Image: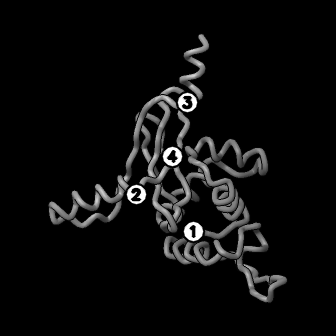
Amino acid sequence: MKMKVKVKKESNGCQSRWSNYTSISPKKEKELDEVLKCRAKRGLKFSKKRAAIIEYFINVDRHYTVEQLYNEIKRTDSKISYSTVYRTLRLLVDCGMANVHHFGKENAKFEVVHKEQHHDHLVCEKCGRIIEFTHEGIEKFQNDVAKKYDFVIRGHEHQIFGICKRCQQKKSRR
């Protein structure tokens, strides 16, 4: 059975497919419409639960394992299943709205794609904290290396592992 997506008039006169289900900003709605198209190609239903997961994931904008996101979502809707969270995150990856990272030995972590700005990660080996950063020098260096070897970069993932400031301070107090 296909779920009919209602269209609601916003106060600014625009119509929104998502406003019946979520409080996502109009700026994100164009990207979310891509999720609808991608979902339809894969034969998945659009449901209030899936919309709630997408809304939460996009609005909170952190790095989540499936289990972490499931545990947070479960507090707001006890009827959402682990498999629905997993399938929704995979859908977002397939649709280009989420990235999946493997930080060391941890389970895969998902994050919202930041199309406007690429970033890299500092990963604390003690507490698992992830710090996002950008550095023009690193980006230039990568491009220079690729140019030297006549290599076309399609994407990259830069992760630096170490100990964050908080964990260093905890260690020095002991």
Look at the numbered discs 4 and 2 and tell me whether their residues touch, using CB distance below 8 Å.
no
Residue 14 higher or lower than 97, as above or below = below
Q: Residue at x 51, y 26 (%)?
A: 126
Judging by the rendered image, the residue that carries numbered circle 4 is: 109
Name the amino acid type tagged 4. Lys
In front of the other: 33 or 131: 131
In front of the other: 160 or 41: 160
Q: Which of the two discs, 4 and 3, sits closer to the camera?
A: 3
- Give the farthest residue toward the right: 11
Name the amino acid type tagged 2. Glu
Look at the numbered discs 1 and 4 and tell me whether their residues touch, using CB distance below 8 Å.
no
Q: SS of the residue at dot 1?
A: loop
Between disc 4 and disc 2, whose residue precedes? Answer: 4
Q: SS of the residue at dot 3?
A: helix
Name the amino acid type tagged 1. Leu
Crowding near pointer 1: few (<14 within 10 Å), some, many (20+)? some
Between disc 1 and disc 2, whose residue precedes? Answer: 1
In percent of width and height, residue 28 lies at 64, 72
Which of the image's four quarters has the C terminus?
top right
Side (left or right) of 99 relative to 21:
left
Q: Residue at x 60, y 19 (%)?
A: 170
Judging by the rendered image, the residue that carries numbered circle 3 is: 165
In percent of width and height, residue 23 lies at 76, 67
Q: Which of the two discs, 1 and 4, sits closer to the camera?
A: 4
In percent of width and height, residue 26 lies at 70, 76
Residue 136 is labelled as: 2
State the CA–CA distance, disc 1 to disc 2.
40 Å
